[in-house]
Amino acid sequence: MRYAPPGLCVNDFALLRDEDGTYAVLHLQGPWTAEFDHLRMETSFGRATSADLVHWQPQGTVFGTGLPGRFDQQAVWTMHPFRYGAGMAMFYTGVSGLTPGGWPVQSVGLAYSDRTDGTAWRRHGTGPVVEAAPRWYRTGESMGWRDPFVVRDDASDGWVMVVCASDASLPVESGGCVALATSDDLEHWTVHPPLISPGDVDELECPVLERLDDGSWLLLGSIGATRGFEAWTAPRLRGPWTRRGPLGPTGAYAPRVIAAPDGSRVVLHTTPRRVGLSDTGDRCRGMLAQPKSLVVDGDSAPRLEWWNGLNAWLGEETDRPVLHAVGDIGVTGPVEITLRTADPDSDRPALAVGCDGKNLWVTGPDGTRLGETVLTDPAATLRILTVGEYVEVYADGVFALTTLCYSGHPARWTATTEGRARTIPVRPVRLPDPHRDDASAVWPGPSPR
């Protein structure tokens, strides 16, 4: 239901699907640490495979830093592999070192493979293929030139690349943009002014372009300040682009789009954890979350919904306490749903979901707000998912809120409305690897007293 390689944390990733239907994920990986060090942690890409986008099997490391003196000698960051000819091409971020002020120097490189499974990469040359142009983009201190994503151009026979960058015409704190470059052959690129520069974003990371069925385009971008991601749509790649607002709530980051086994479009994303697996720990790199259905209906804003492919991992309904579970609740008035209690023999909530119609929130121990959102329309139903410390809430089927809570003991789910309490039946979640016991295993609940 969530994935990280044994003993490691996952950050940005890319998804592939081979001709036999096997999925592969390539992902940044690094060890657990209280202090994040981007030059020493994210120095390789891990790989895992799956038949269903839920149960991932680790397959080891497939790519690492370049030789000393090269543009990618210190770190390799977010990648985008895709089918090219009989094999694959992969653009990726290389970090050569730090500026005098301690900022990572970033550029984009290229690698090829004769295979289609995400392995056997060989670099193209010894230098980057595209770098930030100072005419439009910040270079040196506070620069950005990472997270490349490449698609076929819809206005020529060539290629279009989008890159996370910093608009040189704006202050650093509001200059996050999506840079644009074009190429006829993947190896020689021309940099252009930003494709999107909102003017109110610090970082617009991990841009993703998806061609929709009607020929229009969807762009997803992760917002550094909110730690969520937003959507833009356009009739053509060159725009005009319309901002459609948040698609993934705070805590969902670095999305990727792929066709599920049933042919529908789904989005996978990362989710953080906390250092020491504690409510007081700092947020840190985490895990790959389960898929959500991507729904794009006409002029309506794109949305993420529950993906029915997860239902095969759910057990029969029960009213007994379960740590990993899914439950559905009808909302007829202000309601609080207790998911975990402070003690096994107590009814004092340690984890609860509340909704008064348009306001949706999650509270932890002592009623501390862990997350909240204002819904576009009053919700009639809620679906809640808990997997270890991870909590998701869907309002009328739409992914609306996610958070983390390491406190409390499993309890019967109890919904309280106007002083009246009722038990909510849940469906237990079957974990793909329930017996894992390493730093990346799903949190098993509080330690026995």
Image: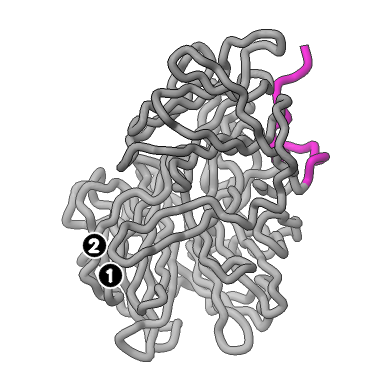
Q: Residue at x 68, y 64 (%)?
A: 62
Q: Amino acid at mark 1?
A: Ala
Magenta-drawn stretch contains 443: yes
Q: Quadrant of residue 167?
A: bottom left
From the viewer's perspective, is 297 left or right of 67?
left
Tell me the crowding category of disc 2: few under 14, some 14 to 19, or many 20 or more residues within 10 angstroms, Cα based.
some
Q: Amino acid at mark 2?
A: Thr
From the viewer's perspective, is 139 left or right of 27?
left
x and y percentages locating residue 175 in the rendered image: 24, 51
In the image, the segment drawn in magenta is: 433-449
Q: Residue at x 43, y 66 (%)?
A: 148
Any part of residue 74 in sight: no
Task: Say which residue label 2 marks.
Answer: 242
Q: Quadrant of residue 274?
A: top right
Any part of residue 356 in sight: yes
Q: Tell me the colour scheme of the image.
A: one colour
x and y percentages locating residue 4 in the rendered image: 67, 47
Residue furthest to the right in view is 435
**Residue nearer the viewer, 299 or 67:** 299
Q: Quadrant of residue 117?
A: bottom right
Q: Quadrant of the C terminus?
A: top right
Task: Say which residue label 1 marks.
Answer: 234
Q: Are marks 1 and 2 in contact (CB under 8 Å)?
A: yes
Q: Which sits earlier in the primary sequence, circle 1 or circle 2? A: 1
x and y percentages locating residue 440 in the rendered image: 70, 40
Determine the secondary structure under disc 1.
strand
Compared with residue 223, is residue 393 higher up or lower down, i.e. above or below?
above
**Residue nearer the viewer, 380 or 290:** 380
